[in-house]
């Protein structure tokens, strides 16, 4: 007979908050568990494995729509993994784009930080003055 876990036990076993487990169930990412006579959810090993898979996908910052597809593809071992490759290729491009955005943001913040080299009075702070105008004129960092 297979061991079953209540939601709190599943939470402890996977490090996933109870609210998140319920959310994944509502979103159809985690199959609805059986319930006992007291209406408690009873999770099985397959739930633990699926939840760990979902959490690993999310730790890689995959959007929920991708996470929705991947378990279904994993559960069809004879199918081509081309769709998985495409999802990852798209995600790599998105991450590269985000890195470029963050690098640009870092440059803008560095320029802004350069506006006030000393701890002067707030009325003389170049950072506060630039934030008030909403732009870094010479360096081209505009809102």
Image: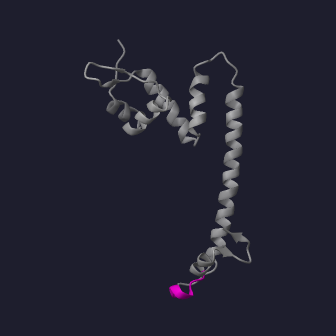
Near-viewer residue (39 or 101): 39
Does the magenta stretch mainly form a helix, a strand or a loop? helix
Is 61 placed above or below 52 here? below
Residue 25 locus on image (x, y percent) = 44, 30
As drawn, which residue projects farthest toward the left?
Answer: 38
Does residue 123 show up magenta in the picture?
Answer: yes
Residue 42 locus on image (x, y percent) = 34, 23
Q: Residue at x 53, y 87 (%)?
A: 123
Can you tell which quarter of the image residue 20 is in?
top left
Residue 87 locus on image (x, y percent) = 67, 34
Near-viewer residue (95 or 118): 95
Near-viewer residue (1 or 35): 35
Q: Residue at x 34, y 18 (%)?
A: 3
Q: Residue at x 37, y 30 (%)?
A: 10
Quarter of the image that includes the N terminus: top left
Is residue 125 visible from the viewing direction of this image?
yes
Is 102 placed above or below 2 here? below
Is residue 120 visible from the viewing direction of this image?
no
């Amino acid at each position: 007979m297979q061991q079953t876990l209540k939601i709190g036990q599943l939470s402890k076993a996977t490090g996933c908050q109870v609210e998140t487990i319920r959310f994944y169930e509502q979103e159809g990412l985690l199959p609805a568990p059986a319930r006992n006579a007291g209406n408690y959810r009873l999770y099985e090993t397959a739930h633990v494995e699926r939840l760990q898979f979902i959490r690993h996908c999310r730790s890689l910052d995959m959007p929920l729509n991708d996470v929705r597809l991947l378990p279904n593809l994993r559960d069809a071992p004879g199918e081509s993994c081309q769709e998985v490759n495409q999802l990852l290729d798209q995600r790599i491009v998105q991450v590269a784009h985000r890195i470029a955005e963050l690098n640009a943001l870092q440059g803008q913040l560095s320029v802004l930080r350069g506006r006030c080299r000393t701890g002067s009075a707030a009325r003389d702070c170049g950072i506060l003055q630039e934030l008030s105008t909403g732009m870094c004129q010479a360096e081209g960092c505009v809102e």
